[in-house]
Every structure is written in C-alpha cells, then in structure tokens.
Image: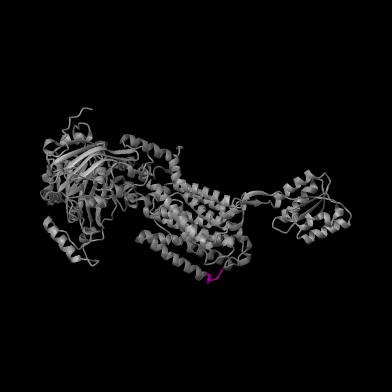
Amino acid sequence: MSLPSPSVLPLSSTNPTNPPLLSLTGIVKSFPGVRALRGVDLRLDAGEVLAVLGENGAGKSTLMKIIGGAHSADAGTLAIEGQEQRFQSPQESRAAGVAVIYQEFNLVPALTAVENIFLGQEVTTGGFVARRREREQVAALFRRMGVEVDLDEPCRRLSTAQQQLVEIAKALIHKARILVMDEPTAALTSHEVEKLFALMRELRRQGMGILYISHRLEEVFTIADRVTILRDGGNVSDCPIHAITRDQMIERMVGRPLDQEFPSRSAKRGGPRLEVSGLRRGKAVQGVSFQVHRGEILALTGLVGAGRTETVRLVFGADPRDAGEIRLDGQVLDIRSPRDAIEAGMGLLTEDRKLQGLVLRHPVRENFSLPNLRRWCRRGFVQRRRERSELDRYIAALRIRLSDPEERVGNLSGGNQQKVVLAKWLARDCEVLIFDEPTRGIDVGAKYEIYLLMNELVAAGKSILMISSELPEVLGMADRILVLHEGRITGEITDVAHATQQQILQLAHA
Amino acid sequence: MPEPMKPARWLADYGMILVLVLLCAFFSAVTYSEQSPTGEAAARQVVEAVLKAVPKGARVLVVASDQPGDAVFAARVERDLTAAGARVLATVTGEPRNAREALQKIQSAGGSMDAIAATRVAGGWRLITDLASDFSSLGSPRVITPASYRWPNFLKSENLLNIANQIAVIAIVAIGMTLVIITGGIDLSVGSLIALSAVLAAGFIRDQAGGMSASTGGMVLGCLLAIVVCGAVGGFSGLMITRFAIPPFIVTLAMMLVGSGLAYILAQGQSIYQIPDSFVWLGRGADLFGLPNAVVLLLVLYALAQVLMSRMKLGRYLYAVGGNAEAARLSGVPVRRVLLFAYVASGLLAGLGGVIMASQLKSGSPTYGNMYELYVIAAVVVGGTSLSGGEGRMLGTLTGAFTIAVIQNGMNLTNVESYTQKVVLGLVILGAVLLDKLRQAR
C-alpha cells in the first residue's frame, strides 16, 4: 500500500526544561482477542487543542479511557508535566488534573447542576453541605464562562448543550488542566457548537490542554491546533493543523486514497409516493406537509429540536398524531402504530440505534429478523433455514463484518451496527425508508458504504426520507431539502447542486 | 440446519446443570448406606437362592414381617416356589409370635423342613436364628434372606420421584415466571393464585359437583374453572401494566394481596376437603412407566415452553420485548399483546399449580402457596435468567427448580434442621447468581 508519507513530528517538546502537559509513549492495550492499541505516542501541550482522529475501532476510545484512568495500559508510560503516572482508577486521574467528558454524560439526572458539579467533593461546614457557597461558586463560574444554565433545575431537564456545560464546569471546579472531550459536538446544533468553540478557545488561552475527539473534520479545522491520527491502534500522523488538508486526513484515517466523499448517482425521480399533509402533535410538530417521490432522497434538516425526528416518528406511527393525513401511492393510510407503518411498507432507522434500533444484548441474527419474522413464519414457527439464508445474503451484500451471526450486536462497531439495522429493513423490502441521522458515530469508510447503499436503493425506485444535522451530508446526498424550524417547514431547496450551508442555516434560524 | 454447539456457549447456557450434577453426586456420597431389597425384587432373589440351595420338591417355610412390601414379598415367594415345584409348608406375615405358631404347627404335624425363605427383618428374628435349640426336630433348615447391598439413599428411585413430585408445582409455575421475567417484568401474585386456584377447584367440587361423590366431569370442570380464573387475574395484571404503565412489581404485589384475600374469603378461612378420593389422580397417580402424573405433566409443559421460546415467533418477541421494548416496538413487534400473553400464561400456570397442589394434598386451603412466589423466582434466577429481562432459558429454570429441590431433599436425608435449611438455601441462591455474574464478567 503506497501512502503519502505522513509528517511525524518529534515527540519531545521543543523546550526540554518545560515538559509537555501530557505525554504518552508506547501505550499498548489488549482486550481478549483484540489488540486495541499497539504502541501509541501522543503529546499535548498546555494551551493547545489537539484533535485525535481515526475511524471507529482505531483506538481513540481506548486511549481516552487510559488517560481517564478507566483502563490501565499493558505497556508504555503516561506522564503529566514529566511526572510518570499510573492511574488505577478514574479518581486518580481526576486528582492529577485530568477531566474526561464522555459522549454519555456522567451526570445524575435528578440532581441540579450545582449538586452534580460538587458531587463527591461537596463544600461542607460541620458536616452540612454549604449550599449557598456552592451555588455562588458555580454561578460565578458560569458567568466567567459566559453561559447561562439554570442552577435549580434537575439536570435531566437541561438541554444536551447545557448538560455539556455542566460537565465542563465540573472539570473547571476540580481545577482540571487537561480536558478530554469525546465527540462534544455530536448532539449540538451549529449555534451551540459555535458557543462551545468560543469557550474552548478561552480555556486554551488560560493554558488548558484540550484533547478533542471528533468525526466532524470541518470542526477540526476551526478549533484544533494540531492533529494526531490513529489507525488500527497505532499512530499514522501527527502534524500542525495547517500542514494537512481535509482529504489527507481522510486518506490517513482510512489508509487508502478516497476519490470522493459522496458517491454520485443517477436515479430518476418518479411520481409522488409518500404524501404527508397537515401533520401535528403538540408544540413539536405544527402542521407539516411534504411529499417524497419515487427514486428520491428528501432531506429534512434544521436545528436540534426543530421537530425533525418528531415529524418522522408521527409518519411511522411511533407517536400518536393530533392531526394529519398520510398517503402512500395515493392511498390514505390509517397508521396507529409502527406495526401499521411497517405493514404499509415503511422502515425507520432511528436516530439512536442503541436505544431504539437494536436489542444490543441479542445476537445479530435475532435483531436482523425482528421485523421480518411475520413473513418467515409458518404456523407460529420460525423458518430458521430461511432466516439464516436471508441473513447470510445481507451480511455478504452489505459487507457486515462479524465473526459469527450469533455474536451480540452490541459487540459490533458503530458502522456494522448501522448496517445490521439497515439489513433488517432491506430484508423487509420497504418502499419508503426513513433514515434518522444515518451516519451518526460512524467512521468515514463505513459512511461511504452507507451512502452507496442509499444510492442503490433510490436507483431501485425506493424513496428515502433522510434527517441529518451534518450539512455537508445533506448537501452531498439529498435531491431536495426541507428545512424545519419550531415544528414548521420554513424553506425548501430544490436546486441542491447550487445550495450552500449558509443558505440552509439561514432558513433553519428562520 | 444443525449447528454445532460450542462448548463454552453450552456451558454458559446450561452451566447450572453441572452444579446440579455435582450436588447430586455430593448427596449420593453422603447418603451411601446399606440397603436391602424389599417386595418383588427381594422375592425374586430369595426364590432363586432357595431353588439353588435345596433339592427340587424341598419343603419351605415363608416368613415375612409386617413392613410395607412384605405382604407382596410373601405372596410372590409362595407363588414362585410352588410353581417351581417346591412345597411351601406355610406362609407367615406378621410378628415372631405368628411364626412361632406356624412352626409349632409344622412340628406337631411331625414334618421336617429344608429351608426358610425370609425377609431381611424376619430372618434376623431370635426365633429363626436360634431355630435349632427350640425346634430341633425340624432338622436344620437353611435360612435364606435377600442379600443386602450398598447404595445411596439419595439415588433410590422412590427418593428421586419424591424430589420430582415435591418440585412439580414450583417448576410448573416457574415456566410462567420465566416468560414474565424474560420480558423484563415480575409476577409476585403466583403464590396467592396457587391458593386461590386450589380453593376454587376444591370449593367447586364440594358445592357444585356433589362433594365426596363428584363425577370426573365435575372435577375436571372445577379445575378448569380455577385455572381460567387465575389466567384472568394474570390478564388483569397484564392490562394494568400495558395500558396504564404501572410497574409490574406494584401491579402483581397488589394482585398478590387481592388473590390471597379472595382465597380466604371463598374458603371462609377453612380447609376444603370434601372431595372424592379419585381427585388425587393428578397429584399422586403414576400411570406412565411409573412416573407420577404431575411429573409427566411437568416434562410435557417444559418441552412445549422450550419449543415456544426457541422456535416460535412469539418466543422471539418475548425476548425482544425484554431486551429493548422500544426497539421491538419500532420493529413492528406488538409489545402490549406480547406482555399480556406473558402475564396470562403466568396466571394460568399458577392456577394449574394450585390444582396440582390441591390434588396432591386432597384438599384446598387458602394457606397454600404461601411464599411460593419467592421460591419460583429463586428457581428462575438460579436457572440463569436475568431479572433485567431479555435473557434466559426454559431448561435453565427447570435446572434451577431441581437444584433447589435437590438441596432441600438432600438436607432432609442428612437430617439438617429446617431452620438451617433456609439459611443454606438462601446462600445457595446468592451463590448461584454470583457465579452467573462472574461468568458474564469474564
């Protein structure tokens, strides 16, 4: 394999008297059957944002857990300001000044921001929690951060962005000098991302070292000073952000040159297939109407909370609707449950495949069969031979990588999990597929394969309704774009080829 | 398509079987003791020995004591010896006094004797061992008794059947509990439903079907009624859980109180025993190869449940609902109906359990099934089914039920006090689940 040779910087800091804030050398970590990390080096200086990139399975999460003390390395050294550390627990890592913000936040939903921030390190006087002093400290901190978070609401009522701010505040209260963030922008709207970046820049100015993990390459260019790229548990690149292009990043992550990010397609758009009119539910969806044509990918976009997911859930019968008519091929459908929608020929790839799309503890085979059992059944008995042959067919067609169809689906990588969800709907031969954030948390290579599949589907005359927060994806894949804002459609873009992200954002903010 | 089962996976699914086998081995070892055959088996052995020891046409006395099986022994020995050409002078069953009378009679008739065929106990009587001194004129007959052998009390077939009979009710109710727990729920009402069902069935037979002279049809009707009522109670729980989203723990806790209260009201706090003797057919009868009917029923139900869970669509749906109800719903699984099925099935099986218990004890009482829900849950959990739902095996539950029964029976055989038994059983349940956790953590 010929690769453009990556420029690897020497790992020692330029100033020997001033050791790097965090340095990892030769970190090795194995799990039963998997060598997750095979000698990774990493350096983070004070006052810089280091982006760590890599496909799923490249070892980013493992590396992060080693820094956070959740795992201990099999070999290699971890030093903070030149002092070698051996973290046996997350507590030890935190005490050394490391704060890790995982994608799943570590907040107690029923406790308020203040209670969460001081959890385990309460300010006390004579055994009693000094609530007022805690509150004042947190309020002052949020003011310095320039954000507003309700201090008295339980955290479960806060938005994702606010919960993230609570996590950051927790790190700051605990005097962390190293902040590790895993996909911090995955669930944020673009406006919230801007705010987060402003805060990160301020923290950087104050001398904090930030390790930033993301799949969104655009963001890496806006926020990172340096990039470290991992592939298959090893370093492939470490360079300043200005020394690398976006395409080079992708190439180094995937290990092969990528021709293009979005495959081109040639599907002919046919007549209208799914027609939705006057869809309503509470405040979330206030009268949405649209049509999806045969052989078309219609993108539904907008800010988080604009009512995109809510809309498709109504179409699919996952939630009861207050009003609205749904027609398929001109016929009015009486959809009261997902079962009705599936019967009518629809399939839904949910936004959150772990919570809504898959039974993680169950084998791939059973997940794949779930919506199809009714057809693969004779007198209540599952036709196991048929089930197995269908599964084998789709594993091959979708190139799902697994060692055994009896493997728990939760053990697969994100991309392969998504392919299993996709396979179960493809086997159902759905006419209308609803893809809610189809490539969330999936690495570049698998994304491309999912795009190819979507193209094949529309080429075969199917209709796809896609929700995505990633504007490049919306622009790259959709035939037509609808923008939602506060439960209403605020704009339609038909000439996608000449549309810009700016244009969408303007419509999204209405 | 037959798929080769990997050993690790097999052990993961049915590791409890190994524990059960080890327990059986342990109790066999500690109850290994001297056994003497009785009844038919003893008779065959003795007849053979007699025919070998003395010439054809020999004169034989048959002596047996009055223990269970001895009458059978005596009759069989007499019949077989006569058929083989020996002359049976007299057949005695009872006490040494009876044997002395018989001997005196033979002596006064002036005859001699070649052999005495006796049971082990009778052969040990002073009278028989000192025969030469008291009845010297009879010659010196050879005393032939069945040979003893060593065998564990635990492994005697009566004991094994006893274990199966004792666990039948819990094991059958545990089928329904497994279904419910696999969906991620729990059913605390089964113990009360056992009582309700027993009282309903017995009460119906007493009041509506003619009491002691009730017909088979009347008894069957009473049992079916009781089972259907329990199924309806389960259905009610299921509706509360699916329609109003009340946690199963709360709903079935309430139904546990309601069911128990109803049983006491219906029985007026009394035991109902005015039922015909033939009612015990289900609980105590043994029609098929000497297997008790309750055990046959248990095996049939487990076979059906195993097929349901491993081969049928409904089984898959039960697992899916317990594994992730939302994902199942969005995949088109009728989640509410599946849950309803689980609770109805649990109610029906608890009702059946109550009927079996009433049949075993030939009466119905509101005190039946007290605390049974906990033993049933214990059987399910020991069998490796996770209380968080989505996982579990029917055969695991069967193993779990038998593990509990074997431990109880083994402790009875080794004279462990009943209070100590509770302590041990509690620790065993904890140990079994701990083992399961450790296995998963690997």
Q: For the image shown, how many numbered marks are present on the structure?
A: 0
Q: Residue furthest front?
A: A17
Question: Residue A447 appears at what percent x and percent y?
Answer: 23, 39
Q: Picture quarter containing residue A140?
A: bottom left
Location of residue B170 with respect to A129 vertically, above or below = above
Does B269 appear in magenta?
yes
Question: Residue B322 appears at what percent x and percent y?
Answer: 38, 52
B217 or B369: nearer the viewer:
B369
Locate residue B224 relative to residue A237 in the image: left or right: right
B65 or B211: nearer the viewer:
B65
Location of residue B307 with respect to A455 vertically, above or below = below
Q: Is residue A403 something one can see in this rendering?
A: yes
Quadrant (top left, top right, bottom left, bottom right) of the N terminus of chain B: top left
Question: Residue B196 appears at what percent x and percent y?
Answer: 50, 65
Query: Range of the magenta residues?
Result: B267-271
Quadrant (top left, top right, bottom left, bottom right) of the C terminus of chain B: top left
Question: Residue A264 appears at what percent x and percent y?
Answer: 20, 34
Specify the principal SS of the magenta part: loop
Locate residue B149 relative to residue A175 in the image: left or right: right
